[in-house]
Image (cartoon, rainbow, N blue to C red):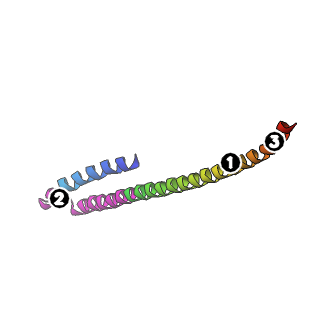
Amino acid sequence: MQLKSKKEQVSLLGEEVCILQPLVKKGITSYINYLNKKQAFIKLKLEMKESENQIVLKNHESHLVKNEIRVLDKKLRLSLSRQLSKYQQELNLMSMPSKKFFSNK
């Protein structure tokens, strides 16, 4: 939302600078006013570019975190699956002698 607002401001300031330039050449408006507007335009463009860079950086960081979560999730699932398999084998081994014991009687 801030980026959209800055883009609109840059657009408006750009138009104003374009309008003021010929007026300065004709002596209708002051050169200092033109320079102030142009300076504000350049500053706002730099701020907008910085905002865009921050968005890209945050998206990249978010992507990295998502990948780390996926890796950790896979490791956890694999570990749980191994534990479950191990416990299932132990349970099967424990239940085998009791079956033999009860079937012999």
Q: Position of residue 11 (x, y in %)?
A: 26, 50
Q: Position of residue 58 (x, y in %)?
A: 45, 56
Q: Which residue, as the protein is rendered here, is positioned at the far front?
A: 104
Magenta stretch in the rendered image: 22-51
91 lies left or right of 61: right
Q: Secondary structure at mark 1?
A: helix
Residue designated by label 1: 84
Front position among marks 2 and 1: 1
Above or below: residue 52 compared with residue 1: below
Closer to the N terminus: mark 3 or mark 2? 2
Is 98 a magenta residue? Answer: no
Q: Which residue, as the protein is rendered here, is positioned at the far left?
A: 26
83 lies left or right of 33: right
Q: Amino acid at mark 1?
A: Leu
- Residue 100 numbered mark, or none: 3
Q: Residue at x 71, y 46 (%)?
A: 88
Q: Position of residue 104 (x, y in %)?
A: 85, 38
Q: Give how far apart the Cα atoms at labels 2 and 1 are.
A: 76 Å
Q: Residue at x 81, y 41 (%)?
A: 100
Q: Are marks 3 and 2 in contact (CB under 8 Å)?
A: no
- Residue 10 numbered mark, or none: none
Is 32 a magenta residue? Answer: yes
Closer to the N terminus: mark 3 or mark 1? 1
Q: Secondary structure at mark 2?
A: helix
Q: Amino acid at mark 2?
A: Gln
Residue designated by label 2: 21
